[in-house]
Amino acid sequence: MTTYGLLVFEDAEELDFVGPWEVFTISARLRGDADTAVLVAEHPGPVRCNKGLRVLPDHCLDDHPPLDVLHVPGGLGARETQLHNTVVTDWIGRTAKRAAWVHGVCTGTFLLHAAGPARGRRVATHWSQEDALEARGDVTVVRDVRYVVDGGLITSQGVSAGIDSALWLVGRLHGRDHARAVRRQIQYDPAPPYLADEPV
Protein backbone atom coordinates (compact mmCIF):
# COMPACT_ATOMS: atom_id res chain seq x y z
CA MET A 1 0.00 0.00 0.00
CA THR A 2 1.26 3.46 -0.93
CA THR A 3 0.03 6.56 0.89
CA TYR A 4 0.45 9.81 -1.00
CA GLY A 5 0.27 13.04 1.01
CA LEU A 6 -0.21 16.21 -1.01
CA LEU A 7 0.46 19.47 0.80
CA VAL A 8 -1.91 22.33 0.01
CA PHE A 9 -1.70 25.97 1.13
CA GLU A 10 -3.01 29.41 0.23
CA ASP A 11 -2.00 30.38 -3.31
CA ALA A 12 -0.73 26.92 -4.26
CA GLU A 13 -0.81 26.44 -8.03
CA GLU A 14 -3.82 24.23 -8.69
CA LEU A 15 -2.51 21.90 -11.38
CA ASP A 16 0.74 21.42 -9.46
CA PHE A 17 -1.17 19.15 -7.08
CA VAL A 18 -4.37 18.34 -9.01
CA GLY A 19 -2.42 16.80 -11.91
CA PRO A 20 -0.39 14.47 -9.67
CA TRP A 21 -3.56 13.81 -7.59
CA GLU A 22 -5.19 12.49 -10.76
CA VAL A 23 -2.21 10.25 -11.48
CA PHE A 24 -1.98 8.94 -7.92
CA THR A 25 -5.70 8.29 -7.50
CA ILE A 26 -6.14 6.63 -10.90
CA SER A 27 -3.11 4.51 -10.08
CA ALA A 28 -4.79 3.52 -6.82
CA ARG A 29 -8.04 2.60 -8.60
CA LEU A 30 -6.22 0.47 -11.14
CA ARG A 31 -4.58 -1.32 -8.21
CA GLY A 32 -7.96 -2.13 -6.66
CA ASP A 33 -7.85 0.81 -4.25
CA ALA A 34 -4.72 -0.60 -2.65
CA ASP A 35 -3.32 2.92 -2.22
CA THR A 36 -4.62 6.18 -0.85
CA ALA A 37 -4.05 9.89 -1.45
CA VAL A 38 -4.77 12.64 1.07
CA LEU A 39 -4.60 16.43 1.09
CA VAL A 40 -2.70 17.90 4.04
CA ALA A 41 -2.78 21.54 5.17
CA GLU A 42 -1.58 23.60 8.10
CA HIS A 43 -5.12 24.39 9.22
CA PRO A 44 -8.53 22.74 8.80
CA GLY A 45 -11.08 24.38 6.55
CA PRO A 46 -11.01 25.43 2.90
CA VAL A 47 -7.76 26.47 1.25
CA ARG A 48 -7.96 29.01 -1.58
CA CYS A 49 -5.43 28.26 -4.30
CA ASN A 50 -3.65 30.52 -6.77
CA LYS A 51 -6.46 30.76 -9.36
CA GLY A 52 -9.26 30.77 -6.79
CA LEU A 53 -10.04 27.05 -6.54
CA ARG A 54 -10.94 26.14 -2.96
CA VAL A 55 -10.10 22.70 -1.63
CA LEU A 56 -10.83 21.02 1.67
CA PRO A 57 -7.88 19.18 3.22
CA ASP A 58 -8.30 15.70 4.67
CA HIS A 59 -5.75 16.21 7.42
CA CYS A 60 -3.69 18.84 9.19
CA LEU A 61 0.06 18.73 9.68
CA ASP A 62 -0.26 16.93 13.00
CA ASP A 63 -2.96 14.34 12.26
CA HIS A 64 -2.18 12.68 8.91
CA PRO A 65 -1.28 9.02 8.40
CA PRO A 66 2.33 8.02 7.71
CA LEU A 67 3.23 9.11 4.18
CA ASP A 68 5.19 7.07 1.67
CA VAL A 69 5.17 9.96 -0.80
CA LEU A 70 5.26 13.63 0.20
CA HIS A 71 4.09 15.95 -2.57
CA VAL A 72 4.85 19.70 -2.48
CA PRO A 73 3.27 21.97 -5.12
CA GLY A 74 4.46 25.39 -6.19
CA GLY A 75 2.75 28.67 -6.94
CA LEU A 76 2.87 32.14 -5.51
CA GLY A 77 2.27 30.77 -2.02
CA ALA A 78 5.27 28.47 -2.26
CA ARG A 79 7.85 31.03 -3.30
CA GLU A 80 6.59 34.09 -1.39
CA THR A 81 4.62 33.04 1.68
CA GLN A 82 5.13 29.45 2.80
CA LEU A 83 8.84 29.81 2.15
CA HIS A 84 8.96 31.88 5.36
CA ASN A 85 6.44 29.79 7.33
CA THR A 86 8.60 27.72 9.66
CA VAL A 87 5.62 25.61 10.77
CA VAL A 88 5.28 24.34 7.20
CA THR A 89 8.98 24.13 6.34
CA ASP A 90 9.77 22.30 9.60
CA TRP A 91 6.96 19.86 8.86
CA ILE A 92 8.26 19.29 5.32
CA GLY A 93 11.74 18.62 6.67
CA ARG A 94 10.53 16.12 9.27
CA THR A 95 8.08 14.39 6.95
CA ALA A 96 10.58 14.13 4.10
CA LYS A 97 12.96 12.17 6.34
CA ARG A 98 10.28 9.53 6.96
CA ALA A 99 8.85 9.35 3.42
CA ALA A 100 10.31 7.04 0.79
CA TRP A 101 9.82 9.68 -1.91
CA VAL A 102 9.55 13.47 -1.97
CA HIS A 103 7.88 14.96 -5.06
CA GLY A 104 8.07 18.68 -5.81
CA VAL A 105 6.46 20.54 -8.69
CA CYS A 106 7.33 23.97 -10.05
CA THR A 107 8.33 26.41 -7.30
CA GLY A 108 7.52 23.78 -4.70
CA THR A 109 11.26 23.23 -5.08
CA PHE A 110 11.79 26.55 -3.25
CA LEU A 111 9.92 25.12 -0.27
CA LEU A 112 11.94 21.91 -0.46
CA HIS A 113 15.11 23.99 -0.50
CA ALA A 114 14.01 26.06 2.49
CA ALA A 115 13.00 22.91 4.37
CA GLY A 116 16.22 21.06 3.56
CA PRO A 117 15.43 18.10 1.25
CA ALA A 118 16.57 19.92 -1.92
CA ARG A 119 19.83 21.24 -0.49
CA GLY A 120 22.88 19.80 -2.15
CA ARG A 121 20.71 18.08 -4.75
CA ARG A 122 20.00 18.28 -8.47
CA VAL A 123 16.55 19.77 -9.03
CA ALA A 124 14.14 21.25 -11.56
CA THR A 125 11.75 24.16 -11.18
CA HIS A 126 9.69 26.47 -13.39
CA TRP A 127 11.87 27.96 -16.14
CA SER A 128 11.10 31.52 -15.02
CA GLN A 129 12.40 30.85 -11.51
CA GLU A 130 15.57 28.87 -12.26
CA ASP A 131 17.95 31.78 -11.66
CA ALA A 132 16.21 32.78 -8.43
CA LEU A 133 16.43 29.25 -7.07
CA GLU A 134 20.05 28.87 -8.09
CA ALA A 135 20.87 32.16 -6.36
CA ARG A 136 19.77 30.64 -3.05
CA GLY A 137 22.83 28.40 -3.19
CA ASP A 138 23.54 24.80 -2.22
CA VAL A 139 21.49 23.45 -5.11
CA THR A 140 22.11 22.45 -8.73
CA VAL A 141 19.28 23.59 -11.00
CA VAL A 142 18.98 21.39 -14.08
CA ARG A 143 17.51 23.34 -16.98
CA ASP A 144 15.54 22.29 -20.05
CA VAL A 145 14.27 19.02 -18.59
CA ARG A 146 10.74 18.14 -17.50
CA TYR A 147 11.82 16.52 -14.24
CA VAL A 148 14.88 15.39 -12.31
CA VAL A 149 15.31 12.45 -9.95
CA ASP A 150 18.07 12.63 -7.35
CA GLY A 151 17.82 9.70 -4.97
CA GLY A 152 14.38 9.79 -3.36
CA LEU A 153 13.76 13.39 -4.47
CA ILE A 154 11.79 14.09 -7.65
CA THR A 155 11.36 17.68 -8.81
CA SER A 156 9.75 18.94 -11.97
CA GLN A 157 9.20 22.06 -13.97
CA GLY A 158 5.84 23.80 -13.78
CA VAL A 159 2.27 22.64 -13.95
CA SER A 160 1.94 19.86 -16.55
CA ALA A 161 5.47 18.61 -15.88
CA GLY A 162 4.14 17.44 -12.52
CA ILE A 163 1.99 14.90 -14.38
CA ASP A 164 5.09 13.56 -16.14
CA SER A 165 7.03 13.17 -12.90
CA ALA A 166 4.03 11.63 -11.12
CA LEU A 167 3.72 9.07 -13.91
CA TRP A 168 7.40 8.26 -13.57
CA LEU A 169 6.92 7.78 -9.85
CA VAL A 170 3.98 5.37 -10.12
CA GLY A 171 5.98 3.54 -12.77
CA ARG A 172 8.88 3.25 -10.35
CA LEU A 173 6.60 2.10 -7.54
CA HIS A 174 4.31 -0.24 -9.46
CA GLY A 175 5.91 -0.93 -12.83
CA ARG A 176 6.15 0.71 -16.23
CA ASP A 177 3.16 -1.13 -17.67
CA HIS A 178 1.07 0.15 -14.78
CA ALA A 179 2.24 3.74 -15.43
CA ARG A 180 1.34 3.38 -19.10
CA ALA A 181 -2.12 2.13 -18.09
CA VAL A 182 -2.55 5.19 -15.87
CA ARG A 183 -1.46 7.47 -18.73
CA ARG A 184 -3.98 5.83 -21.03
CA GLN A 185 -6.76 6.04 -18.44
CA ILE A 186 -6.30 9.79 -17.93
CA GLN A 187 -6.07 10.31 -21.71
CA TYR A 188 -2.71 12.03 -21.30
CA ASP A 189 -1.00 12.17 -24.66
CA PRO A 190 2.20 14.16 -24.44
CA ALA A 191 4.59 14.48 -27.34
CA PRO A 192 6.66 12.43 -27.26
CA PRO A 193 4.35 9.97 -25.49
CA TYR A 194 5.20 8.80 -22.00
CA LEU A 195 7.48 5.78 -22.26
CA ALA A 196 8.53 5.47 -18.61
CA ASP A 197 12.04 6.45 -19.67
CA GLU A 198 14.70 7.16 -17.13
CA PRO A 199 14.81 10.81 -16.07
CA VAL A 200 17.80 13.12 -16.14
Image (spheres, rainbow, N blue to C red):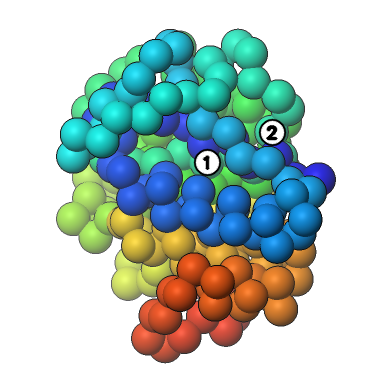
Residue that carries the numbered disc 2 in the rendered image? 67
Q: Is residue 8 left or right of residue 26?
A: left
Residue 62 appears anywhere in the view: yes
Label placed on residue 39: none
The amino acid marked with disc number 2 is Leu
In this view, the residue in front, 187 or 127, is: 187
The amino acid marked with disc number 1 is His
Q: Residues within 10 Å of mark 1 (few under 14, many from 20)?
A: many
Q: Residue at x 39, y 14 (%)?
A: 45
Secondary structure at badge 2 equals loop
Q: Is residue 98 left or right of residue 53?
A: right
> Eyeballing the image, is 103 above or below 89?
below
Q: Quadrant of residue 84?
A: top left
Q: Residues within 10 Å of mark 2 (few under 14, many from 20)?
A: many
Label placed on residue 71: 1
Q: Is residue 180 left or right of residue 145?
A: right
In this view, the residue in front, 53 or 41, is: 53
Q: Residue at x 30, y 29 (%)?
A: 54
| Image coordinates for residue 57, horizontal then vertical, percent | 47, 24
In this view, the residue in front, 8 or 122, is: 8
Residue 155 appears anywhere in the view: no
Q: Residue at x 57, y 84 (%)?
A: 195
Screen quadrant of the N terminus: top right
Q: Quadrant of residue 44?
A: top left
Q: Tell me whether circle 1 and circle 2 mark residues in contact (CB < 8 Å).
A: no
CA gap between label 1 and label 2 equals 10 Å
| Image coordinates for residue 128, horizontal then vertical, percent | 18, 55
Secondary structure at badge 1 equals strand
Q: Residue at x 54, y 77 (%)?
A: 184
| Image coordinates for residue 72, horizontal then vertical, percent | 46, 39
| Image coordinates for residue 50, horizontal then vertical, percent | 21, 36
In this view, the residue in front, 26 or 158, is: 26
